[in-house]
Image (cartoon, rainbow, N blue to C red):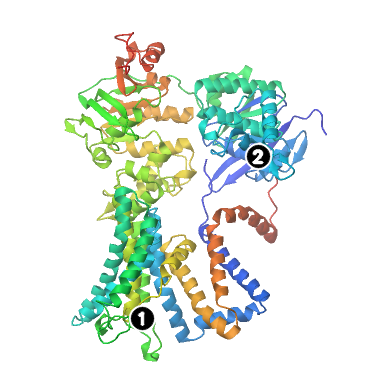
Amino acid sequence: MFPDAPLLEMEGITKEFPGVLANDKIDLTLEKGEIHALLGENGAGKSTLMNILYGLYQADSGSIKINGEIQKIEEPNDALNLGIGMVHQHFMLIPQFTVVENLILGAEPRKNSVFMDMSEAVKKVKAVSEEYGLSVDPYARILDVSVGMQQRVEILKALMRGADILILDEPTAVLTPQEVQELFVVMRNLRQLGKSIIFISHKLEEVMEISDKVTVIRRGKLIGSVDTCQTDVNELARMMVGRDVEFTVNKKPATPGPELLRIQDLHVLDDRGLSAVSGVSLSVRAGEILGVAGVDGNGQDELIQAITGMRKPISGKIMLKNKDITHFLPRDVFESKLVHIPADRLRHGLITNFTIAENIVLRNYYTRPYSERSVLNWDAIKKEAQNLIKEYDIRTPNEDIAAQSLSGGNQQKVIIARELSQDPEFIVAAQPTRGLDIGAIEFVHRRLIKARDDGKAVLLFSLELDEILALADRIAVIYEGKIVGVIDKEEATEEKLGLMMAGISQDEPSLVAGGV
Amino acid sequence: MLTNNKKWWKPFAGPLAAIVLGLVIGAVLMIITGTNPIIGYAALLRGSFGSGINFSETLIYVNPLIFTGLSIAVAYNAGLFNIGAEGQIIVGMLASAFFGYKFADLPRVLHIPLTLFAGMGAGALWASVPGYLKAKFGVHEVVNSIMMNYVALHLSHYLVTGPLQDPNTTLPYSPDIAPSARLWRFMSRFGEQYRVNTGILIAIVAAVFTYWLLYKTTTGFEIRAVGFNPDASKYAGMNTSSAMAKAMLISGALSGLAGAVQVMGIQFKFLDLFGFEGFGFDGIAVALVAKNNPIGILASAFLFGTLQRGSQTMQALAGVPKETIGIVQAAIIFIVAAEGMWQGWLPGLDKIKALVTGEKEADV
């Protein structure tokens, strides 16, 4: 035993995957009762490092010491026995089971060594959840509870198995702002009780708010470890991205041209046959970005699907450059030079089993030079993919890699490369930066502004008010399937938009839209 | 994060290991039942390859399995499970038996393609019913395919005891097809028993064609895209219903071709069936072991055909019940299907490899 040794020391961890050095001699030291942020862009190697600590991967070289003693961690069970617990980004819970059933899974308390002792289990869960201030409803089924609650269950699960070191893999990515604050309360509480937490993130404000120490890695290399109180957002951003980052988007004033898209009194139903878009009218001009702000689930998805041909409107009109595209199919819309960056990149944007090259031509594989008389020209397809990989800085060894093995940011770059390289006149961008790190967000924002400056019209849907405020020239707010109002960027403030997003129109502050 | 840029042999490692393991399991069974597995397998190989005739018969087993394996694979690539190959074979046989004797005056160069296409068309038509219902209304193709199998079986009973029955007999079979509709038995100069025919070449061409279709054409691109992710395919502007329908039609045509070649190369008539012959179901196993790769299907169909043909000789010469080979096949299918479990073993295999090659294990 080494009483003065830190709780955890990872030294010189190196891990190579074919074609990429994911971790290159990375050191990380964690003290007892410390919240240690692991910061880096998507694909920097944070998750690899933590998967090595948790025994999911084996390092090629390097050592892991717990309390000063070298330990071999070959599988998650070894990690659990050493008091290391991990909460993955995608929860490992059984949705049909209750909270308590999930918590005792694999270690069920028994009566007469045969029957499950439910009351004992509930007692145990209640005791642990009270001890750590993590309130959960033991009898609720996982599929009925919020994401924040599911995360608490995951944390409890790790604690019940005796974890002293908790690895939280991007825990805030799935939470609402309020839930993030609740999580931080829990984390501080755990620190008070002597637990150590490794907090993986790429969000700088959160790291500054919650952590004691920050370790930054970039492209598999250790950039440095600093005390949080001795650094600031700008320094961390520089360490993470490798250069200065502009937090404010620089852009020239818009020089709008003629109207390109006109939506008139559009009505669209959702999957259940209920009205989702109820009389939306919008107009977007060339050379401007119209931002659509709103809380999720207020008809944005259905409106996007109607514009892009994926859902048939029940009434109303969509005109693109004086052409009626209301009843166009997705391919007709695309051929009318309207492209779409979809909100759900894994469901709509990519075929993850396909290679990058195949995804690049997903839209236009049937046109020359990618095919001729129905026969694909793989040389031309690969060449185009190579060009776009270079132009859009997609980090991949080559174009034959399956899209599923790219990081989220690089997946999004594949989509953006495909859509923007079509020489579009109109761009519908839905949540274009969801789940991306600052480097990638900056990239996407620059591309959208460049498209605008090139005279293209952009319709931007985002749930992030910051993004809308940074990019949009005019802002429309959608609430319960109706446009509450459209204001110029200069008039927009967060408060004003916040009120509108709650359905309170600026013209008649007393009227709640959708109430009639 | 970038991960496993797979080595080229990785996709084959699983199936190959499964085959070896399956054979080992068969050997253990033989030892338990008191046979020397070396003698058993030697008899099996003799049965499959021991003489020209044996090899010819092996190829006759292999031939329909290639077609049905391809049929299953094309549908699977579009995310569909064509369990109706069995029925599509039957209607393929019926159609080519009919066209084979009905248009007896045609010259060979016309009659053979016509009879082949008749079988393909009938198979495609049969598959189009579940294909259409799936594409148009989203009805699950498995239920409808199975029902279509029984419709085909009973239709064939009716036809060979009625309209299609050979008028010169009371037995349930159709008239012989005209010589102009028969496939060339290219080894017949060595003896009557050499039944192997150009059907095997048609099967190889079909495999190459299927590969080309899936990986080199826009139709194949659409089929594979829809199979992996119908939502993204729709978003990208593809007609997903049409891609599914096309895959089902091609799948049915390939199964129908299996039936046509069976009639035109082997039976020369439609013989009443006691039940399903099993080529369609075995095709599922063939496609599975080949991981739906058309070229791999040539190999896996060859393996399954070899085992089936050889098992009879094994029973006769070594006294090993031919059901043993059924167990070997089942073991292979099981091991390939349990891919997840298998991949869990791979790290262990890496360790063994490291020991064998003397490499130092990774220092964690």
Q: Residue A232: where, in percent of width, then height?
A: 57, 18
Residue linked to disc 2: A54
- Name the image quarter holding residue A431: top left
Left or right of A493: which side holds A310? left
Residue linked to disc 1: B266
* Residue at (40, 21) in percent of width and height: A249
Q: Is residue A168 above or below residue A21?
A: above
**Along the line of sight, the residue nearer the viewer: A423 or A468:** A468
Left or right of A491: which side holds A248? right
Q: Which mark is residue B210?
A: none
Q: Nearer the viewer, mark 2 or mark 1?
A: 1
For the C terminus of chain A, the quadrant is top left
* Residue at (69, 51) in percent of width and height: B361
Number of callouts: 2
The chain letter under disc 2 is: A
Q: Is residue A51 visible?
A: yes
The chain letter under disc 1 is: B
**Along the line of sight, the residue nearer the viewer: A72 or B41:** B41
Left or right of A299: which side holds A166? right
Q: Residue A243: where, in percent of width, then height?
A: 50, 26
Q: Secondary structure at mark 1?
A: helix
Type of residue at label 1?
Ile
For the N terminus of chain A, the quadrant is top right
Q: Residue A343: where, in percent of width, then height?
A: 39, 33
